[in-house]
């Protein structure tokens, strides 16, 4: 590179190594020399381009929330449901905790995330630093893991497959709008607070210097253990209690999570059954066991396989939100399956317990600091730089 490095410092969030930032060219990225963690990628989009993406996402989300995801027909009667209607049905069924959780992660937090991006990018487009710049960037990073529109989309597809054998079903505008919104929101999750800060710096905007984060606190280990024990406590009722009850033509059935997987397999939808099994059975138990292993190895100050353990922690963070799949499936089925004595679908207590497992495991992963493992091994900050 012919350009001199800027005085901006980069701290690896995975291992704590400190680097001096240098400008990136197209198709370049920077990785941590110590743990191979991704530090920065070249930004193809300008703030104006990101504003266009955010506005497009708000438009398709409005359509997704306003129009039915699907319409179910049973003996001449029709029932339509969108996301907000399904949340209301879940509340009225006596499960306000499930309704509030799904409303937050499926509607309120994604919308807040989009407006926060507008708050940041509109002033940047005008060449000004947004007000409350640093708090806004911090809030953005905290919101990202809880924006679960892509998970809701997969839940809608699973719900449709489950209902096809019960009655005639027609996909609605809301489903196609949700597909578009999921794609756009996935693109927007590439935006981190650090990426936006560097974007402002590269535009020549005067951004206040940011001090490196403080050393990791060992107290994070005890907090993570507490959250994991809470998740394990809820894991058993989440799997043993029914997540929903179905009453069809005088026949009642109560399905657990595994019961729903077996039902999908029996319907011939083995691929959907596999998706639900991975997201709702394998992933939660895998997260708990893997995160517990990582915390234990850190607590005993093990120095083995630090790079691999860091990558596994990143995997735990990435898969965290997909466990919400079964909760979205349940509320959509409850919203669509309201035909009196002909068909009635309601959430069950297992859905509330399972939602608690998802939240606690995500909080445990977010609370744990992988830098502790490297610090226990004697690694401290160092100044270096490497272009791929």
Image: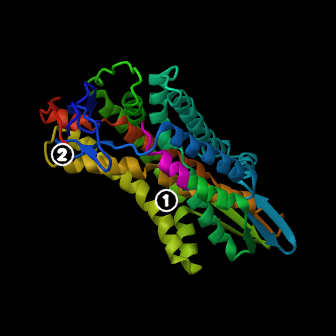
Residue 306: image quadrant is top left
Q: Which circle's residue, 1 or 2, is located before the other in the chain?
A: 1
Considering every residue shown, the one lying at the far front of the view is 2
* Residues shaded magenta: 183-192
Q: Which mark is residue 280?
A: 1
Rounded to the nearest angstrom, the CA distance separating label 1 from label 2 is 29 Å
- Residue underneath mark 2: 306
Report x, y in % for residue 21: 25, 32
Residue 371: image quadrant is top left
How crowded is the residue under tag 1: few (<14 C-alpha within 10 Å), some, or many (20+)? Answer: many
Report x, y in % for residue 173: 72, 60
Res 243 visible:
no
In depth, the one of 385 and 361 nearer the eye is: 385
Residue 266: image quadrant is bottom right
Q: Residue at x 37, y 18 (%)?
A: 208
Left or right of residue 155, residue 278 in this image = left
User: Vertically, is 88 above or below 333?
Assistant: above
Report x, y in % for residue 288: 37, 50
Res 31 visible:
yes
């Amino acid at each position: 590179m012919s350009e001199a490095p800027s005085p901006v410092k980069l701290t690896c969030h995975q291992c704590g190594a400190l680097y001096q930032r240098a400008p990136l060219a197209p198709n370049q990225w920077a990785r941590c020399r110590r743990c191979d963690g991704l530090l920065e990628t070249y930004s193809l989009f300008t703030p104006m381009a990101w504003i266009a993406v955010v506005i497009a996402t708000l438009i398709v989300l409005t359509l997704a929330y306003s129009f039915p995801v699907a319409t179910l027909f049973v003996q001449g009667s029709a029932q339509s449901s969108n996301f907000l209607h399904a949340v209301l049905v879940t509340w009225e069924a006596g499960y306000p905790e499930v309704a509030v959780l799904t409303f937050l992660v499926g509607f309120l937090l994604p919308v807040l995330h989009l407006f926060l991006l507008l708050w940041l990018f509109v002033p940047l487009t005008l060449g000004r630093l947004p007000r409350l710049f640093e708090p806004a960037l911090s809030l953005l990073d905290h919101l990202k893991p809880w924006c679960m529109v892509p998970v809701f989309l997969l839940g809608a597809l699973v719900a449709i497959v489950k209902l096809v054998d019960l009655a005639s079903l027609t996909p609605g505008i809301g489903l196609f709008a949700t597909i578009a919104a999921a794609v756009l929101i996935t693109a927007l999750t590439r935006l981190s607070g650090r990426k936006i800060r560097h974007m402002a710096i590269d535009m020549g905007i005067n951004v206040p210097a940011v001090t490196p984060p403080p050393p990791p606190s060992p107290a994070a280990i005890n907090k993570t253990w507490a959250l994991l024990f809470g998740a394990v406590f809820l894991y058993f009722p989440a799997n043993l209690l029914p997540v929903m009850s179905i009453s069809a033509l005088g026949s009642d059935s109560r399905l657990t999570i595994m019961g729903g997987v077996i039902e999908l397999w029996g319907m011939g939808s083995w691929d959907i059954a596999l998706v639900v099994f991975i997201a709702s059975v394998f992933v939660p138990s895998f997260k708990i066991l893997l995160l517990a292993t990582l915390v234990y190895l850190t607590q005993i100050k093990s120095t083995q396989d630090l790079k691999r353990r860091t990558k596994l922690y990143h995997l735990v963070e990435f898969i965290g939100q997909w466990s919400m799949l079964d909760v979205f499936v349940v509320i959509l089925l409850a919203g669509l399956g309201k035909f009196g004595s002909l068909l009635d679908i309601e959430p069950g207590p297992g859905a509330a317990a399972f939602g608690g497992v998802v939240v606690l495991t995500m909080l445990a992963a977010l609370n744990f600091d992988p830098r502790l493992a490297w610090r226990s091994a004697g690694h401290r900050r160092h100044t270096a730089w490497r272009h791929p």
